Image: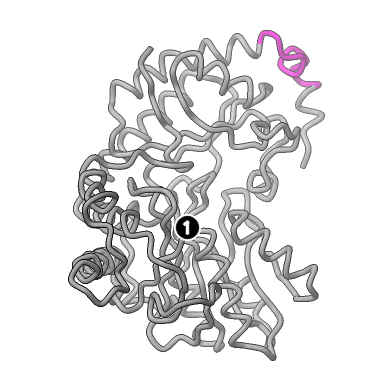
């Protein structure tokens, strides 16, 4: 059975070029980059090259790049650092639709006595600049808002928010794990103080992340240890992963102008075909301000988990936009925050494409999806109930 992988917001395939460049650093080039001898020095030079490649993708300086273990560590470090360097401030601003790497840290801090403002989103998943402005208080230490939502792909105006934060003397951090490599990022032309990204979201390996910290930004290490990363993150470097991330960033920068647009065209074809062939289906998120690879779509009166199982039987690997896959009956916090009707939120599916997907794969998905939804609706009491189901729709 042919495998069609359209769950790239969860993780991506390691690019063959990345794998090839990593391989020697698992075997013959195993030196510790902190060692003073030649064996360690050649590894240190490769790390330097990786730092330059990452910096080039996001318009930063190499010295502003800190290698971490993942996007979650980068997010945690940014938030904890902002609070550490602002001991007299105890207020954090974020949104209701953040990834758990930020959302759960905010909840943890709230339990510790910090004040947290979670900004709402509208029906298209967007936030209001005015709401950000009104939320800033004299004791605000940090604003942390994602660049792109992992479920809907909605893009937030982070550069405008960063300018606003700067004008009020507040640090700004963005979780760009889903955005890096899919949309242009030029930090040199922005006021963003800190940014997180992760290797396995852009065809690099798992177990490697980056925290960008703008030169001059006050910073406190989260992992305290040796002198690695300029004393900003202790621990012996994960050399093969760093090398792989560097190559992945170089490839992403090369592919961004052309390949990403091809991916957008495939996503749009899939979206148009599903909307036209399946009644009572709706797209979640802003129609334009969205990642080029992401389609969150709801099919009313069916369960997302059932759709995923049927798709898996056909060799299609996608993701549910709800929490059904974790056994919960509750829709995702993102769709709930957007006010997506209850009967639609439960039947949401996220298709997230990569540059390795093809038009033939989109045709196959468009072929198998209508009968799957028709079959599931035929056994759905809500579908049979029709108007009765609509009357139960939650606000």
Which x, y percent locates residue 195? 45, 68
Residue drawn at the location 70% of the way across and 9% of the way down: 379
Residue 303 is left or right of residue 167, and the answer is right
Q: Nearer the viewer, residue 146 or 339?
A: 146
Which x, y percent locates residue 268? 37, 35
Q: Nearer the viewer, residue 217 or 236?
A: 236
Q: Main secondary structure of the magenta part?
A: helix
Name above or below for residue 261 compared with residue 347.
Answer: below
Residue drawn at the location 32% of the way across and 77% of the way down: 189
As for residue 386 lying within the magenta part, the answer is: yes
Residue linked to disc 1: 70
Which x, y percent locates residue 375? 60, 9
Residue drawn at the location 24% of the way across and 47% of the way down: 23
Q: Nearer the viewer, residue 312 or 388?
A: 312
The quadrant in which the N terminus is found is top left
Name above or below for residue 380 compared with residue 330.
Answer: above
The stretch in magenta equals 378-388
Q: Quadrant of residue 236?
A: bottom left
User: Does dot 1 land on a helix, a strand or a loop?
Assistant: loop
């Amino acid at each position: 059975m042919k495998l069609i992988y359209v769950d790239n917001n969860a993780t991506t395939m390691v690019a063959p070029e990345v794998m090839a460049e990593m391989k020697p650093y698992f075997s013959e080039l195993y030196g510790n980059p902190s060692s003073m001898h030649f064996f360690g020095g050649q590894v240190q030079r490769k790390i330097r090259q990786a730092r330059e490649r990452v910096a080039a993708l996001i318009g930063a300086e190499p010295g502003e790049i800190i290698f971490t273990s993942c996007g979650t560590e980068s997010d945690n470090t940014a938030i904890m650092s902002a609070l550490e360097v602002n001991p007299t401030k105890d207020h954090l601003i974020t949104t209701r639709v953040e990834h758990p790497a930020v959302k759960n840290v905010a909840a943890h801090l709230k339990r510790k006595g910090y004040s947290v403002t979670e900004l709402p989103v509208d029906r298209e998943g967007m936030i209001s600049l005015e709401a950000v402005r009104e939320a800033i208080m004299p004791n605000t230490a940090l604003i942390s808002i994602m660049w792109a939502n992992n479920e809907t792909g909605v893009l937030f105006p982070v550069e405008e928010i960063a300018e606003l934060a700067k004008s009020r003397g507040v640090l700004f951090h963005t979780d760009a794990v889903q955005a890096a490599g899919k949309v242009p990022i030029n930090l040199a032309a922005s006021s963003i103080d800190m940014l997180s990204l992760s290797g396995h979201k852009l065809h690099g390996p798992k177990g490697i992340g980056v925290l960008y910290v703008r030169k001059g930004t006050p910073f406190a290490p989260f992992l305290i240890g040796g002198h690695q990363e300029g004393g900003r993150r202790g621990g012996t470097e994960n050399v093969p992963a760093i090398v792989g991330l560097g190559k992945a960033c170089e490839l992403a920068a090369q592919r961004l102008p052309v390949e990403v647009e091809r991916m957008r065209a495939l996503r749009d074809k899939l979206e148009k075909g599903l909307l036209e062939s399946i009644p009572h289906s709706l797209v979640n998120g802003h129609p334009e301000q969205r990642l080029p690879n992401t389609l969150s779509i709801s099919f009313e009166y069916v369960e997302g988990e059932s759709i995923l199982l049927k798709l898996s039987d056909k060799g299609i690997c996608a993701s549910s936009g709800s929490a059904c896959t974790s056994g919960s009956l509750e829709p995702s916090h993102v769709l709930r925050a957007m006010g997506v009707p209850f009967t639609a939120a439960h039947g949401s599916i996220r298709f997230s494409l990569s540059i390795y997907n093809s038009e033939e794969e989109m045709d196959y998905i468009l072929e198998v999806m209508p009968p799957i939804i028709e079959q599931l609706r035929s056994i759905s009491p809500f579908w049979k109930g029709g108007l009765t189901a609509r009357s139960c729709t939650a606000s």
